Amino acid sequence: MEKKELKPAGVFRYFEEICQIPRPSKNEAKIIAYLQAFGKQHQLETHTDEAGNVLIRKPATPGMEACKTVALQSHVDMVCEKNNDVRHDFLNDPIETVIEGEWMKAKGTTLGADNGIGIATSLAILADNSIEHGPLECLFTVDEETGLTGAFALKEGFMQADILLNLDSEDEGELFIGCAGGVDSVAEYHYQETAVPEGYFYAKIQIKGLTGGHSGGDIHLGRANANKLLARLLNQAYQQHDMYLCAIDGGNLRNAIAREAYAVVAVPETDKHALRTELNIYSAEVEAEYAVTDPDMQMVLESETPCPKAIDRDTALRLIQALYVVPHGVCAMSQDIPGLVETSTNLASVKMKPHHIIRVETSQRSSIESSKQNIANTVRTVFNMTGADVSHSDGYPGWKPNTHSEILEIATESYKRLFATEAKVKAIHAGLECGLFLQKYPALDMISFGPTLQGVHSPDERMNLPSVERFWKHLLDILKHIPHKQ
């Protein structure tokens, strides 16, 4: 399939334009300017708040002025992940898209369909005067991926909508009516530098090629976490050898399952062959454990140039033990909705920072507020017991499902009418901005839906092309059937 043949043509034209605009979280100035220019070009009422959220209004199609006002909502930032062998500057370089069969993906980076396809869909509707709809608002929020900053900053009165359609879900044919709340927990270790004795062998141990994925949407799939695998190996090696930890690095983003990690260690020269043997055995064991979820896993040990200094032995041991025992993955399944993860935690990243600090970032999610706080406190306790300073973000609320929603009924009837099959009504473990919107606009009636995306938050991200057309048809049909205001 050629790009020029993609349908709906307007959606894919705007998506390709958006891919040319760098838009990492917290660096959205270029996409904000693009949206402002779009509003001006199409002579549409356009507003930007202090946080950078953009709202574009379009009057109703003649004869539909009495309908309830609908907001189409998407976020403008994208997760920026790439394979290590790919040269890409997310602050300046465009995303290069390719088509493989019925899927679109990027060349070695995240695609940004999360949530670029939502932006493109909204723009295509705003630009097309043949589409029937009532009073329309398109809300584009900033910094969803690293803290929901735009949704937090949204002020009452910025929107006028009665109904909000969140275009940030990833399974076409599924309508989401609830999501988990979340909180980030960050641990910091302060270390001293120490000299490694003479006669030591230095090695870089790498774990790479893991599947990774979204720490909300994919956490139940049991995929390997590179930070956990590395900690398990280091803990074992620490028991067997007089080992020094010189460097450690793993993962990147709080909402992504770590795909890669490495450590630089030093052991006595007499132990280097034993260390290689132990890694080979460990690698075989772990590859067998994760043969289904992570078939491309690689563990590599390479000789390394001697390091002038290492992390002091006490801090290194406490760090390794904490990473080894801190929970990661699903903690509880929902008792109300079959198959829904209720509570989880993600060991996201381990980074060495200036001023002799090692920072460990984790994120916790739950659809139950007390459970969210409980798992965050569990993580905090593990790190506190090993001497780390721990802080928590403010977190964000969940979105409690409303099974009696009017827009849900309209959307389910529309899907059945269009496709002669029932849409699935679900809640999602990933975080959405909807819970925050409800805090500011308690009367909002909301659902979330979108085309099918896979591998989001990783370079394997891909978008199913036929699902985009189905999503588009469904959305337009919903807009035609919005009820009148009472």
Image (spheres, rainbow, N blue to C red):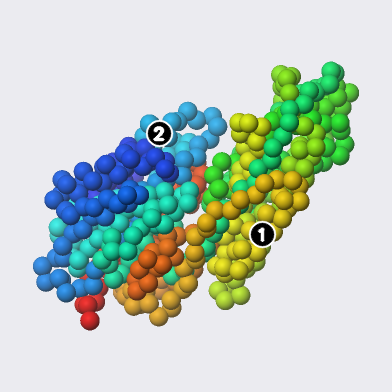
307 versus 25 height, above or below: above
Q: Secondary structure at mark 1?
A: helix
Of marks 1 and 2, which one's residue comes earlier in the chain? 2
Q: Quadrant of residue 443?
A: bottom left
| Tally of numbered discs | 2
Q: Residue furthest left?
A: 62
The CA distance from mark 1 to mark 2 is 36 Å
Q: Are marks 1 and 2 in contact (CB under 8 Å)?
A: no
| Residue in view at x 63 percent, y 31 percent | 355
7 versus 474 height, above or below: above
Q: Which residue is mark 2?
A: 91
Q: Which residue is mark 1?
A: 377
Q: Residue 166, how many percent across, how many down?
A: 37, 62
What's the amino acid at mark 1? Asn
Quadrant showing the C terminus: bottom left
Q: Residue 229, how many percent across, how many down?
A: 71, 44
| Residue in view at x 26 percent, y 42 percent | 34
Q: Compare residues 244 and 99 and report the one nearer the observer.
A: 244
Mark 1 vs mark 2: give the one in front. 1
Q: Secondary structure at mark 2?
A: loop
Q: Compare residues 274 and 152 and report the one nearer the observer.
A: 152
| Residue in view at x 37 percent, y 37 percent | 22
Q: Quadrant of residue 111?
A: top left
Q: Decide: few, some or many residues near mark 1? Use Cα within 10 Å; few <14, some 14-19, many ≥20.
A: some
Q: Is residue 70 visible?
A: no
Quadrant showing the N terminus: top left
| Residue in view at x 16 percent, y 62 percent | 59
Q: Is residue 127 visible?
A: yes
What's the amino acid at mark 2? Leu
Q: Compare residues 157 and 256 and report the one nearer the observer.
A: 157
Locate residue 34 relative to residue 431 in the image: left or right: left
